[in-house]
Amino acid sequence: MTSRDKLERDHTPRKIRQRLAQGGDHSYLGDFVFGAVDGTITTFAVVAGVAGAGLEQTDIPTVGGSVALVLGLANLLADGFSMGVGNYLSVKAERDVVARIRREEDQHIDIVPEGEREEIRQIFAGKGFEEPVLSEIVTVITQDRRRWIDTMLTEEHGLSLKTPSAVRAALSTFAAFVVVGFVPLMPFCFPGGMSPTTALGVSCAATAVCFFGIGMAKGKVVHRSIFCSGVETLLIGGLAATLAFIVGFVFRA
């Protein structure tokens, strides 16, 4: 099927009606992808910093015998929680703004209804509508209070009527940060099975693959070349790790 055939199939009256009825539901894939990116970069930066400082070769007592694992897990949980909470507060604030402006517009309709009708008139006049169609539009919109307020929210204030769930957005970010961010730490979970140098090498390889995979997923979310996005994320993650390694090396005991 060609792209033209697919477009024609998706633009039949029935398909359009179904798509509009469903509305623009929020995809939490973006929250997951960006949480995974931050989680992997942040955690691997800890691993690189530990390696640069040579802490794995010290006699610091740790649970499991790995400094990278202890610091990485602490960072993973703390930063993951922080990112999840931050995303929750951000989405909640967005929903609160929509609710506040909705209340304000509702009050304005009670106090100055003619002024609010004039706003609707000027909004659609600015879109090129003229009389008598313009008056019909104003009448239809202002006959339904909900529709009237919704129109003011989207047209006057540029707000979206559908906002994502703050809890789901937070959980998506936290889960991605912790699950994917744990990849750089996995080789250090078996300290008796490989040397610190080998564990670091395995961590680098696994993280590189992870960076590239996350970048490809990010490219799909933002509709960019998945290969270029994968390379970009790999380079950014590598740069972050290099900086962390240099800092650790400079302050090496």
Image: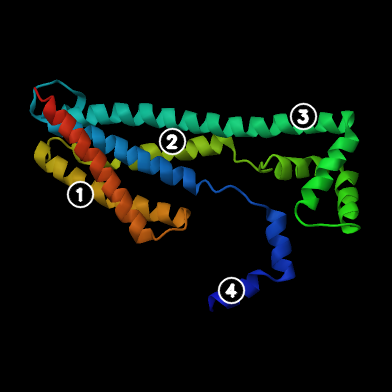
Numbered circle sitting on residue 205: 1
Distance from label 1 to label 2 (Cα)? 24 Å
Q: Quadrant of residue 78?
A: top left
Q: Residue at x 10, y 25 (%)?
A: 252
* Residue 6: image tag: 4
Q: Are marks 2 and 3 in contact (CB under 8 Å)?
A: no
Residue 93 shown left or right of residue 145 in the figure: left
* Of pointers 1 and 3, the one earlier in the residue sequence: 3
Residue 232 in view here: yes
Q: Amino acid at mark 2?
A: Phe
Amino acid under disc 4: Lys
Q: Position of residue 93 (x, y in %)?
A: 59, 30
2 vs 3, front mark: 3
Q: Which residue is mark 3?
A: 104
Mark 4 falls on what kind of element? helix
- Badge 1 marks a residue whose secondary structure is helix
**Alpha-carbon span between mark 1 and mark 3:** 55 Å
Considering the image in quadrants, where does the C terminus appear? top left
Which one is nearer the viewer's eye here, 131 or 240? 131
Which three-letter amino acid code belongs to the residue tagged 3? Glu
Q: CA distance from mark 1 to mark 4?
A: 40 Å
- The amino acid on which the numbered mark 1 sits, given as a three-letter code, is Ala
Which of marks 4 and 1 precedes in the sequence? 4
CA neighbours of label 2 inside 10 A, class few (<14), some (14 to 19), many (20+): many
